[in-house]
Image (tube, grey):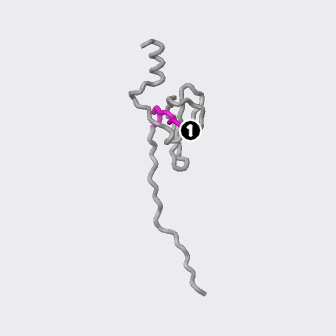
């Protein structure tokens, strides 16, 4: 009988880089253009309400718009940061109300 070689498992452990979320809870974000899975208006500002584990290669977040009664789940690559110097929806409402 001929000796058969038995493949041995590598003793090296596979280390993956820890995934870190780009956005933080409470941060204002906007859905990027082309994200048409949901019936939202582009330009709506959402607040991050929670960080979720990755789905495949994409980190996920719970987000909510104050005009909606539900939260959405969005992947990190479908969100963009709202700059602090951009007028928010609330600021625009105040400006229209008080005619600033």
Of 85 and 42, which appears nearest the observer? 42
Q: Main secondary structure of the magenta part?
A: loop
Above or below, comparing residue 76 to residue 12 in the picture: above
Counting from the top left corner in percent of width and height, residue 6 is at: 55, 76
The residue that appears at 52% across and 31% down in the rendered structure is 42
x and y percentages locating residue 31 in the rendered image: 51, 35
Q: What range of the chain is rendered magenta?
A: 24-36
Query: Which residue shows up at 45% across the image and 12% down it?
Result: 98
Q: Is residue 30 magenta?
A: yes
Question: In the rendered image of this protein, does residue 86 appear above or below residue 32?
Answer: above
* Residue lying at 47% horizontally and 33% vertically, measured from the top left: 29
Considering every residue shown, the one lying at the far top of the view is 98
Instruction: Indicate the quadrant where residue 67 lies.
Output: top right
Residue 1 image-quadrant placement: bottom right
Q: For this view, does 22 lie left or right of residue 66?
A: left
Q: On screen, 32 above or below 97?
A: below
Give the farthest residue toward the front: 34
Task: Name the outermost residue toward the bottom.
Answer: 1
- Helix, strand or loop under label 1: strand
Could you tell me residue 12's position as x and y percent? 46, 65
Residue 57 belongs to the span the image colors magenta? no
Q: Which residue is mark 1?
A: 73
**In which quadrant will I find the C terminus?**
top left
- Which residue is painted at 47% across and 35% down in the image? 25
Mark 1 residue crowding within 10 angstroms, few (<14) / some (14–19) / many (20+) = some
Residue 14 image offset from top left, x and y in percent:
47, 60
Query: Which is nearer the eye, 62 or 41?
Result: 41
The number of numbered badges drawn on the structure is 1
């Amino acid at each position: 009988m001929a000796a058969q070689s038995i493949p041995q498992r590598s003793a090296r452990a596979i280390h993956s880089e820890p995934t870190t979320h780009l956005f933080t809870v409470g941060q204002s974000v906007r859905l990027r253009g082309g994200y048409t899975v949901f019936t939202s208006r582009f330009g709506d500002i959402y607040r991050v309400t929670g960080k979720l584990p990755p789905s495949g290669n994409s980190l996920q977040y719970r987000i909510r718009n104050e005009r909606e009664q539900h939260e959405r789940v969005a992947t990190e690559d479908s969100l963009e940061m709202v700059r602090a110097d951009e007028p928010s929806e609330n600021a625009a409402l105040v400006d229209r109300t008080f005619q600033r």
